[in-house]
Image: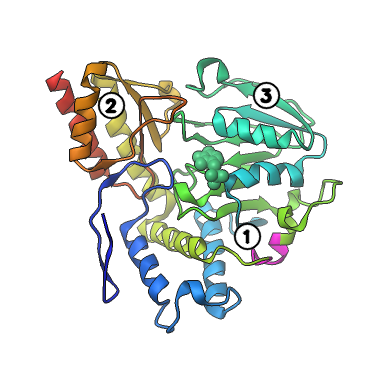
Amino acid sequence: MPLQVKNHQLIVMKKHNFSAGPCILPQEVMQKAAEAVVELNDIGLSLIEISHRSKEFVEIMETARSLALELLGLEGKGYHALFLQGGASMQFLMAAYNLLETKAGYINTGTWSLKAIKEARLLGEIHEVASSQDQNFNYIPKGYEVPSGLDYLHLTSNNTIFGTQIKEFPKTEVPLVCDMSSDIFSRTMDFSQFDLIYAGAQKNMGPAGTTLVVVKEDILGKVSRQIPSMLDYSVHAGKDSMFNTPPVFPVYVSMLTLQWLKDLGGISAIEEINEKKANLIYSEIELNPVFSGFAAKADRSTMNATFNITDETLKETFDTMCLEAGINGINGHRSVGGYRASMYNAMSLESVGVLVDIMSELEKKG
Ligand SMILES: *Cc1c(COP(=O)(O)O)cnc(C)c1O
């Protein structure tokens, strides 16, 4: 539904947005972001028409970078936070460019892992340490051994398409690299177990157009190849993420979202809400015979719930009920089919409740 701008005051009419990405953002973040496009902080200029070297924007970038480290508990621990471009897909290549000397390990848990593997193969030997491809990625492999001598082990913490999530990360001496695009800032963990974390903004942080990269200083400068400047983490870190013109709008919105999360009480506060949302929908999927879950129970994602309808004759009724209730974006990815309800940080428990009520109403109709 349209946004109406009235004297910088926004009236926003919202649907229940279960889209997998780009996706829901906090209402107040979108209001502030829209205001800044008109005028930033009463400076008489728009956010998107000022120099990225202006003191206003430099402060925005610095705030965004330090909030990211603060929320992850990585402040003062030798990490750089960078806001880069090219999406998480660029990180598939960049991670390998910067860290892969001879051989790296990858845990293959789905489409995004496969894409990461494909790019890394351009630069060295890739060992697929474990995979769940044998069952169309409906589970997370466990109990595998991480070979020593790898330059790094790459994992995908949350598999957006299949609805699986790594709950426990391997304990190993090998440096860990993690694609956290679809669950960063959603759950507490010891983020210092990773040497490199990256996440496209558009799943839990902001609009498409920037990627958060959190990289440990120690791990850089070890490969012998020449790295093109734009692909070199050290270059971006050395310029405080301002080597070239940064994507000012996505960085600003990310900063607002991180501020929103901090004000809410940080990751531990949002984790509690995320668990409530996930429990609500998964208990409905389990109890309601009209639906069946796709992902293995122990590996179910708190961010993306994937499920099928068991009685296809009810599909049309379900789709109509969802449409009428203002539910948006629950069609499953084409490689899985069925439905996918994405419940990122900004989604309310109430919205999940609306969907669950429809699911249980459908059972009565069946
Ligand atoms: C969406 C997504 C990507 C791809 O992100 P882009 O920004 O489109 O390149 C990569 N990994 C995961 C886990 C994702 O969810």
Residue at 46% of width from left, 53% of height from top?
205
The residue lying toward the viewer, choosing from 145 and 220, is 220
Residue 351 occupies quadrant: top left
Left or right, 93 with respect to 348, comes to: right
The quadrant of the rendering that contains the C terminus is top left
Q: Where is residue 130, by image quadrant?
A: top right
Comes first in the chain, label 2 or label 3: 3
Position in image of residue 315 (x %, y %): 25, 23
Q: Which residues are magenta?
A: 236-243
The label number, if any, that marks residue 129 in the structure image: 3
Protein image colouring:
rainbow
In this rendering, would 169 be left or right of 121? left
Give the residue type that dot 2 points to.
Ser
Q: Position of residue 309 (x, y in %)?
A: 29, 21
In the rendered image, residue 297, in percent from the top left (x then y), is placed at: 40, 22
Q: Earlier in the sequence, mark 3 or mark 1?
A: 1
Q: Which residue is mark 1?
A: 76
In the rendered structure, find residue 348 and report the number of the disc placed on it: none
Assess whether mark 3 and mark 2 are in contact (beta carbons under 8 angstroms): no
The residue under label 3 is which amino acid type? Val
